[in-house]
């Protein structure tokens, strides 16, 4: 997994509330395509495309300069709904590396950290203010998200602090998902297993009922 440290980029405001994972990536588009590298073109299908398959010019990520956004500013409860990791993949394959919002669906939030995307939680008023700053510059004013300093810098230069659970912050800074973090402790795990075999050998006997 690629780590995240600091990003200064175009941010796209998508302030609609309760965008669920089926809007992010419809289940119909996951059938036969639920692997990395195949779902990005179907992200936000209902918002992104017209019924005839052409792009909807009203959708923010179809418009310049937001088409090149690497940061998404969202309305409350983004990523709610059913559990599907490809929702994060789809956004990531569109080029999004960080999402700023006032709240996220729990599973979506967890999946972001497991896939190298930083979800930043700020209060609703602050999120709205950042979105307004971006819109005032017509998207040309870049937003900076700094995980090392745990702060967002708005287009006007205003600094806003955020918090991330330390274990998740370290994992994302170092590019480690839960498996990667566990493998870093391989020596400790093997040492524990060896001690446990010596102290409780019956646990490891073939055919043991214990």
Image (cartoon, rainbow, N blue to C red):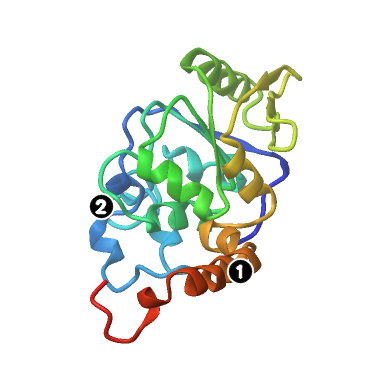
In this rendered view, identify the residue nearer to me: 46 or 7: 7
Residue 65 seen in this snapshot: no
The alpha-carbon separation of the residues under discs 2 and 1 comes to 59 Å
Label 1 belongs to which residue?
A: 191
Q: Which mark is residue 55?
A: none
First in sequence: mark 2 vs mark 1: 2
The answer to whether 188 is drawn above or below residue 157 in the figure is below
In this rendered view, identify the residue nearer to me: 117 or 44: 117
The answer to whether 64 is drawn above or below residue 179 in the figure is above
Report x, y in % for residue 55.
40, 51
Left or right of 205? Residue 154 is: right
Quadrant where the C terminus sits is bottom left
Q: Nearer the viewer, mark 2 or mark 1?
A: 1
Residue at position x 62%, y 28% in the image? 138
Report x, y in % for residue 14.
45, 32
Report x, y in % for residue 157.
76, 20
Residue at position x 43%, y 61% in the image? 41
Residue at position x 66%, y 24% in the image? 137
Left or right of 168? Residue 145 is: right
- Badge 2 element: loop
- Badge 1 element: helix
Label 1: how many Cα within 10 Å (few below 14, some 14–19, many 20+): few
Label 2 belongs to which residue?
A: 51
Residue at position x 50%, y 43% in the image? 61
Whether the residues at callouts 2 and 1 have beta carbons within 8 Å, the answer is: no
Report x, y in % for residue 50.
31, 49
Label 2: how many Cα within 10 Å (few below 14, some 14–19, many 20+): few
Marker count (numbered): 2
Residue 208 seen in this snapshot: yes
Quadrant where the N terminus sits is bottom right
């Amino acid at each position: 997994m690629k780590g995240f440290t600091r990003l200064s980029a175009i941010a796209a405001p998508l302030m609609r509330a309760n965008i669920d994972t089926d809007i992010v990536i419809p289940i119909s588009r996951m059938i036969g395509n639920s692997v990395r590298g195949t779902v990005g073109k179907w992200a936000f299908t209902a918002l992104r495309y017209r019924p005839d398959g052409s792009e909807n010019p009203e959708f923010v990520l179809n418009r310049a300069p937001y088409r090149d956004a690497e940061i998404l500013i969202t309305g409350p409860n983004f990523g709610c709904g059913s559990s599907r990791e490809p929702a994060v993949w789809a956004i990531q394959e569109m080029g999004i590396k960080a999402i700023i919002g006032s709240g996220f669906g729990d599973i979506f939030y967890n999946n972001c950290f497991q896939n190298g995307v930083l979800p930043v939680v700020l209060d609703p008023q602050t999120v709205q203010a950042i979105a307004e700053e971006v819109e005032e510059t017509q998207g040309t004013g870049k937003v900076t998200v700094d995980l090392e300093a745990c702060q967002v810098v708005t287009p006007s230069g205003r600094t806003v602090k955020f918090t991330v659970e330390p274990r998740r912050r370290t994992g994302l800074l170092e590019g480690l998902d839960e498996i990667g973090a566990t493998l870093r402790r391989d020596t400790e795990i093997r040492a524990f297993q060896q001690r446990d075999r010596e102290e409780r050998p019956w646990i490891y006997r073939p055919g043991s009922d214990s």
